[in-house]
Image (cartoon, rainbow, N blue to C red):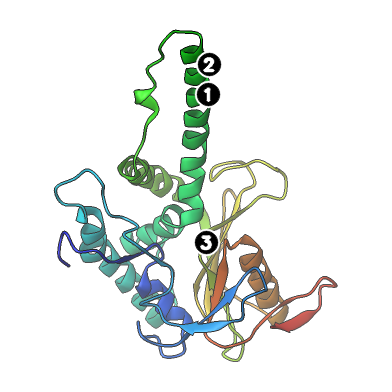
Amino acid sequence: MSVGKQTNHHFIPACYLKGFTNGRERDSRLWAFPKDGVKKAYGTNPNNACSKNNYYKLENNTKPLLIEKWYGDVIEPKIGNFLDDLKLNMTLDRNNEGFIWLLSSLFLRPPLWRNNIESPLRRCKEIAISMKNDIDAAGENLDISDINFIKDDIICIELEQIKTVANSLFYFNFKLCTIQDNINIITSDAPFILANPDRKTFGLLSTGTILLIPINKNMYIVGTKGIPLNGTHYASKYDVANINTIIWNASEERVFSNNDKFIMLDDDDNTIFYP
């Protein structure tokens, strides 16, 4: 990759997305389903899905694509090797470096999380500008240059959070869940899902937090703290429909499937095919 070239950057690794296709290649067909229900499903592939132009391009660096090149050259191969080993051996090694990088990437890289970082910074800037306008109108001057931020600052925060997320994951026990060949798990543009039945506001290490992450079209994992999870769970058709519904609800803009239909639950808790 040329260090100065303009390009699309995956916020969800292509080596992960290809596991949700029938061909399991980066150019295999992947069906995208817009969440708004207005646009129709369309065909794409892992090379093109979940990417944004210059998403990780630094604005104030002599090597603007340094981070993305490092991720593509160093991190994504570790994730790909982990996913290949998991598919082959059907055994989840929670200490595998690729596993930690996969979960950290699915948590921290999507636009939904980036917006969570930017939102309070944008709000602080709006408040500072409003205060400056009031003070300037009174004939005084307020320097608010310190509240300015650029994309590099956001990327730096994301990178600093990797260690926190990685350390937090060691508190979780994980169970690998597999499904039948004739039904499939979907994924989304925000596939790292946190749930907590006891709290409205919670975080990764909050008491009762549960993790749900689709791994490929035939597997997903569940993570809990303090509750031992052993062996492999073989999910029923209802389980898959329920998990797909959760993935749909947690997505930001779209979900992805290996086929042009997938199972989920309707409002009456019945298993249906969507669309």
The reply to whether residue 225 is in sight is yes
Q: Position of residue 46 (x, y in %)?
A: 40, 78
Q: Secondary structure at mark 1?
A: helix
Crowding at dot 1, Cα within 10 Å, few <14 / some 14-19 / many 20+, comes out as few
**How many marks on residues?**
3
**Sequence order check: which comes first, mark 2 or mark 3?**
2
The answer to whether 128 is drawn above or below residue 82 in the figure is: above
The answer to whether marks 2 and 1 mark residues whose Cβ atoms lie closer than 8 Å is: yes
Circle 3 packing at 10 Å, graded few (<14), some (14-19), many (20+), is many
Relative horizontal placement of residue 93, taking residue 62 as reference (left or right): right
- Please give the residue where the numbered disc 3 appears in the rendered image: 190
Residue under label 2, please give it. Answer: 134
Q: CA distance from mark 2 to mark 1?
A: 6 Å
Q: Residue at x 54, y 46 (%)?
A: 204
Question: Residue 239 falls in which quadrant of the image?
Answer: bottom right
Q: Which mark is residue 130?
A: 1
114 and 40: which one is in front?
Answer: 40
